[in-house]
Amino acid sequence: MSFNVIGKSVIRVDGLAKVTGKAVYPQDIYMDGMLYGKTLRSTVPHAYFTLDTSKAEKIEGVVRIFTAKDVPGHNAHGVLFKDHEVFCAQKVRRIGDPLAFVVATSEKIAQKAVEAIEVKYEELPAVFDPVEAMKDEIKVHDGTSNIIYHYKLRKGNIEEGFAKSHVVVENVYKTSMVDHAFLQPEAGIAYVEEDGTIVVCAATQYPHFDQLEIAEAMGVPAEKVKVINPAVGGAFGGREDITLQIHLAIAAVATGGPVKAVYSREESFVAHSKRHPEIIKIKTGADKEGKLLALEAEIIADTGAYASWAINVTRKSGIHVTGPYVIPNVKVDAYAVYTNNPFCGAMRGFGATQVPIATEQQMDMLAEKLGISPVEIRLKNAFTKGSETANGQILTESVPLITCIKKVADALEMA
Amino acid sequence: MKKISLTVNGKLYQVEVEEDMRLLDLLRDKLGFTGVKEGCSEGECGACSVIMDGKLVTSCLIMAFQAEGKEIITIEGLQKEDGTLHPIQQAFLEEGAVQCGFCTPAMVLAAKALLDKNPHPTDEEIKEGISGNLCRCTGYAKIVSSVKKAAEYLNKGGK
Amino acid sequence: MELKEVIKARTLEEVLDVLDEKGEKAKVIAGGTDLVIQLREGKVNPEVLVDISDVAELCFIKETGDFIEIGAATRFVNIKESPVIGKPFKGLQEAAGHVGSPQIRNLGTVGGNICNASPAADTVPALLALDAVAVIKSKQGTREMPLEDIYIDRGKVKLEPQEILYAVKFLKPQPGQGLGFVKLGLRKALAISTISLAVFVERGENEVIKNIRIGSGALSRFPVREREVEDFVKGKKMDNTVIEEAAEVFGQVLEKRLATRPPVEKDFKPYAIKGVFKEALNKAWQRTK
Amino acid sequence: MKKRGKGIACIFYGTGYGNGFPDVSRAYAELQPDGKVAIYTGATEVGQGAKTALSQIPAEVLGLTVDDIIFINEDTSITPDAGTAAATRQTYNTGNAIKMAAEELKKELINIAVKELGLNSDAGLEMKDGKIYLKILPDKCITLAQIAAKQSEPLRTFATFTAQTVQIDPETGQGAPYWPYTFSACAVEVEVDTETGQVEIIKAAHAQDVGRAINPKMIEGQMEGGFAMAMGYVLYEDLGLENGRIWNNKLSTYIIPTAMDMPEIQNIIVEDPESTAPYGAKGIGEPVMIPVGPAILNAIYDAVGVRMTEIPVTPMKLLQAIREKEKQGA
């Protein structure tokens, strides 16, 4: 097949605006008479709290301070479970939970007012270790187990698989919680159009979902909300969950807007999701020739205080922990667990990035024990056209894994 | 308030600045040069870089009053009035050095500051020249090759 | 305190007048690479800010008699590129070249590096190894003190509110002298030093290490001289055994010094120092030739 | 002492929402008065190149250039929902929806051309460079702008694409949780300083299955960016979490790679078209990152013989592991 446009490295259509500095990111929008918002966030990981905004309200230039009682619709959001509060009502579950949003005539005044709000915490015991959290002695969300998801895979006979194995390797791996560190910190501006449409302009990965979440929190039909998504300064999964969108909408409607907010880098770090850290206990067995016979894994993913995409991420870990290999006997248990840590959600690779840290080192260890090369053991087990995954899915086409392995091995002269 | 004068992209500005205002705030909020980006506020990401008296500097680490009498170039000063791109901008486009674009304006300026001083840089010198500009998207490879290509364009007397 | 007045000084006299009049209320700003952040975070709250970055009298690198003298407002980039400093002391230029990033090197000054008294200041270990002297001025006059003595604690130097660091100076390189510098950071640019080390050596007859001075960064509350190691090496013949033994001594010194520090320091630096020291010493020795 | 080692890793990656969840993308294609075609869709440009790759697809369908495609994706009030710019799904999902909308538009345009040109059928009609003409008699020709001028309402088509996955059984995990999968492999050579614990990546080769490459340079850009992010993940990045508090909350303490840390990377694009994908193209945004980390860890082992089971492998952790090994050896 020959193509005219497909397969050509055409110049990126948004490139010109970006190399000339004309591309508009949310922080680059300035409107007449705009007000500035700043968020007050929790400084303790688990506590009941009360707020006293009276001193802050008296500061000249403070227009209004919004808290949980000012959320017109549902005080909740979340990509899967609605377990985030727009503003915490009584309880905080992590450091960085939003408590209030100050709107003032200048950023400086808003900041001053945030500092003038008095917060009284009644601290609760907190849990930071996901293994501890699985005992449910301290509950992060009342009335719910901390274990919010359990992925189970059972294929073949795992005991028999290991019994037949000539070599078995077992280890525990730990991956860390990391940040997307996109270059553009969160920013946005909101205003109300003449017909009452609420316009929120912010960098997001999924404008239509933001529209629904804003509408639910505002208690208006989705058609009354418009999300404008200008240039996005990197995302990598970190702009999946709502950060400032609803705060801005509430403030714009109540004050008449426009209201702008720009997060500092420090606030950006606490405001958006993180990559789930995982504890991966894994046992892998192979026969004399290096054919994989069995794999058993237990994965514990710490999702922090909110679920975000935890269920999908953990499922993805469970599905991908086998590596791209044909294995007849597989047993996997993967758990997503609430703790009082920063909340974790989507980040590039989404659960499939963590598990190869374990699986792929296991492969090398098996190869070493068998006296074969890392390349060889991979070629022996790699998926090809027609292979069946541990989930029982048939890979019918477009499976050029062996080509990939051979090409990189050749390039670095690995045999 | 303090009155200062400075030149930005060849134009003289006389402005009143607050004592605690940074050059970054002056350029963005007062003068409207929003191609200057704020990414970290501590001179680490380089997104706010501008060229001041011929040198690449992070405008978040300079107080506005310090810029009295300075000549500043921002990304807005690179494109010619007829729309012709600066050879570095052209090379960035052609080589695919742009992704999210947030680091791009300052990255282009870093390349300019480097090439103004060293018209024939090696790969290592290019990497050093842009080492104060973080990019999370590109892994820098295409940026390095763009700077090389831009050097060729410039040495041939522009494209 | 709220910032009420900002002054862009053009002469040293102007600066000294302001400091004399305002005293503790005033703060000198040069490159601003640390101060602007501190101002925003409210960690320093001066009423008056006086900018010395364009005071020409403070920006120089020159030979004066037996000394090389560097003005306090001299940028790192100028040190890095200076023809005055001379090949044997290239280690000082490497130290300046390791500071932050091109942007920081274009802004940051050697005086700021000294006066901020950060433990991880990159140029200070090199200046300590060169036995540099701090030249301090005020309206009342000029005084000098060994750079080593200027530090009181992390972030604190022995300068009166009316005083300003005017310059640092050190003896010009003599035949047989060399300075090596090595920095360990978590990445290759924009790195805060986890260890920085400068070694000055003087080669005597028969490959004897006639003199050695070691300046370290990030191994103490502020940059220091490592005299125990110096004493061990001084007078010995340069060979692999001495290098290895000295590295061991350095490790032991740090084991003791960092015993109560967090694991990232106490379980790392006493061991990593050995490789760093050996490399810095070897570099210095090369330059004596 | 500096020691070198090589490591390899390979991975598979399931794209899309997966697990039977309706993974839907929608798009409009609309003829503009000047003969250009506007695409309306909710797919976000986050820097990955969605606007460009997703313009190349309708340009190919309609015989136009990318300059003739106006891509509108910034405003929810005028664009249909195309799902999230995540899960490596936009090229495949929204690419399919756009391709279908463009093909539908092409069909309508051809039908109009048949009528306007007074032809008996659409046999032998070509659509190229903004014109529809009869191959055997090129003068029988009408431009898209001419067609647009004849419409009372803008000519607009709409398409929806829904990916196919099957929910897994909750007890056994059996099902078809993702489709399609993409594959990649990476090999790296590292140099480890056994005295300071520093790891330097000397060179790397990185192969990515793409189905079909829509824009090779942009794919390379993703691969290089993914490489850098993975390097950060296994060697540098650490939030310094302590009792729920992030201590490294600045870019001066949360260390990501700089240009100077990056090695020479050889990118290898592997094409093996997927029949359900637009022109065979599969998404690659996430998988490009994944094999890099374990390849680095395997290379570290090859260099110094220590298995690093916890990331990031900071100089401190690595030096400790090396010392531990030396102790055991002695």
Image (cartoon, rainbow, N blue to C red):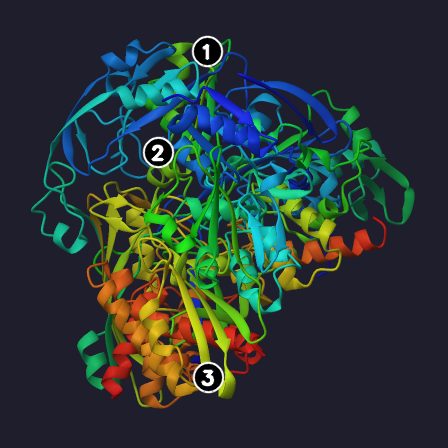
Q: Amino acid at mark 2?
A: Lys
Is residue B52 shown left or right of residue D291?
Answer: right
Q: Are marks 2 and 1 on the same chain?
A: no
| Labelled disc at residue A196 | 1
Q: Is residue A116 above or below residue D72?
A: above
Which chain letter goes with mark 2? Answer: C
Query: What is the distance, in whole Å, between disc 2 and disc 3 at their CAs?
Result: 49 Å
Which chain letter goes with mark 1? Answer: A
- Judge whether residue D73 can be spotted in this image: no
The residue sitting at 56% across, 74% down in the picture is C287
| Residue extending farthest left | A137
The residue sitting at 56% across, 38% down in the picture is B48
| Labelled disc at residue C43 | 2
Q: Which residue is mark 3?
A: C208
Q: Residues within 10 Å of mark 3 (few under 14, many from 20)?
A: some
Q: Amino acid at mark 1?
A: Gly
Q: Amino acid at mark 3?
A: Val
Q: Residues within 10 Å of mark 1 (few under 14, many from 20)?
A: few
Is residue B10 shown left or right of residue D284?
Answer: right
Q: Is residue A171 above or below residue A371?
A: above
Q: Nearer the viewer, residue C153 or B40?
A: C153
Report x, y in % for residue A154: 23, 66
The residue sitting at 37% across, 47% down in the picture is A346
Report x, y in % for residue A216: 33, 24
Which of discs 2 and 3 lies nearer the camera? The answer is 3
Report x, y in % for residue A19: 67, 41
Q: Nearer the viewer, residue A162 or D265?
A: D265
Q: Nearer the viewer, residue D30 or B131?
A: B131
Q: Nearer the viewer, residue C284 or A325?
A: C284
Q: Which quadrant of the figure contains the N terminus of chain A?
A: bottom right
